[in-house]
């Protein structure tokens, strides 16, 4: 008999959830639910929206579940299940909340105890899930999520590497010192938005507008973005020596516009765009649940 886990990827604007069959590590399509979330709202409304998505997934699943596995942005105390987001423009009303206990109260009829709810950083979840889907289990992989922020994860032989001299602490690239600030200041949507306004005198919302603009500035920005990305990755790439790099997130569609510096500067045999970021994050969260329960 198959076993199942309820999983979800929590983002800044919505939550996607579904039930995963552990025999295939596939999300049951009929159970996929997406609910918009106002991450600036009060805690009660946010929890209500998260609960709504999870309940919708369970309503379309006839079997039982062994637990709930969540892919969650940081800062977050993943071991304890406590939200510590402050100064990041999302979910600040949740600061100090023990999300594990809050969700257990909502779903205790489905699971045995609070330890059946696990949390994993969203970028780590993405790379774990993408490694599974790409069958890269015997590879050394760097996974990146590029969009509003700069997420990263390192996987070797199917296992997350977070505390190792070959990777930054926690596998976190975004906070590495770079130029006059940190890496994320130069590797994020806000860098494109700021630089476009500075050079073109126009306000834009995101990278899609840069990609679609028929202007020299457009390719200049992508070239510079690729150079910033390769420069921040190079020292860690030399130490970790990955064989593959998987890139997800909102900027994935433009990979061919900024991939040249990555290919020229980093000694990685294959660099791919993986557009199914949420699906990979949900699968990765479920894999983490299984590893925690061993």
Image (tube, rainbow, N blue to C red):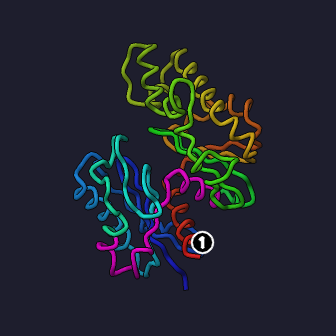
Left or right: where 16 falls relative to 180? left
Please report the residue visible at 60 percent of the width from the left and 35 percent of the height from the top: 255
In the displayed structure, 177 sits above or below 127; it is above
Main SS category, magenta section:
helix
Please report the residue visible at 27 percent of the width from the left and 45 percent of the height from the top: 40
SS for dot 1 = loop
Residue stretch rendered in magenta on the structure: 104-133
Please report the residue visible at 55 percent of the width from the left and 14 percent of the height from the top: 216
Q: Is residue 114 magenta?
A: yes
In the figure, residue 201 lies in which quadrant?
A: top left
How far from the left and from the top, in percent, is residue 239? 74, 43
Location of the N terminus (image quadrant)? bottom right
Q: Is residue 126 magenta?
A: yes
In the displayed structure, 134 sits above or below 30; it is above
Nearer to me, 176 or 287:
176
Q: Which residue is mark 1?
A: 24
Nearer to me, 55 or 10:
10
How far from the left and from the top, in percent, is residue 294? 59, 76
């Amino acid at each position: 008999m198959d076993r199942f886990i309820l999983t979800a990827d929590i983002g800044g604007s919505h939550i996607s959830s579904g039930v995963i069959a552990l025999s295939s590590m596939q999300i049951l399509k009929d159970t996929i639910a997406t609910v918009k979330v106002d991450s600036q709202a009060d805690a009660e409304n946010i929890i209500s929206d998260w609960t709504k998505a999870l309940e919708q997934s369970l309503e379309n699943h006839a079997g039982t579940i062994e637990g709930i596995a969540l892919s969650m942005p940081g800062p977050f105390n993943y071991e304890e299940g406590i939200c510590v987001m402050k100064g990041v423009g999302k979910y600040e009303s949740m600061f100090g909340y023990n999300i594990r206990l809050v969700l257990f109260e909502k779903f205790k009829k489905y699971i045995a105890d609070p330890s059946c709810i696990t949390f994993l950083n969203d970028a780590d979840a993405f790379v774990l899930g993408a490694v599974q889907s790409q069958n890269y289990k015997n590879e050394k992989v760097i996974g990146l999520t590029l969009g509003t922020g700069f997420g990263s994860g390192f996987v070797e032989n199917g296992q997350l590497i977070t505390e190792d001299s070959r990777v930054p602490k926690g596998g976190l690239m975004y906070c590495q010192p770079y130029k006059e600030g940190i890496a994320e200041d130069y590797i994020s949507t806000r860098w494109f938005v700021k630089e476009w306004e500075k050079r073109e005198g126009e306000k834009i919302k995101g990278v899609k507008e840069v990609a679609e603009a028929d202007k020299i500035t457009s390719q200049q920005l992508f070239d510079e973005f690729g150079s910033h990305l390769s420069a921040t990755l190079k020292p860690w790439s030399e130490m970790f020596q990955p064989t593959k790099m998987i890139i997800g997130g909102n900027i994935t569609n433009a990979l061919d516009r900024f991939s040249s510096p990555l290919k020229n500067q980093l000694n990685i045999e294959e660099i791919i765009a993986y557009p199914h970021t949420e699906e990979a994050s949900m699968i990765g969260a479920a894999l983490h649940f299984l590893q925690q329960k061993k």
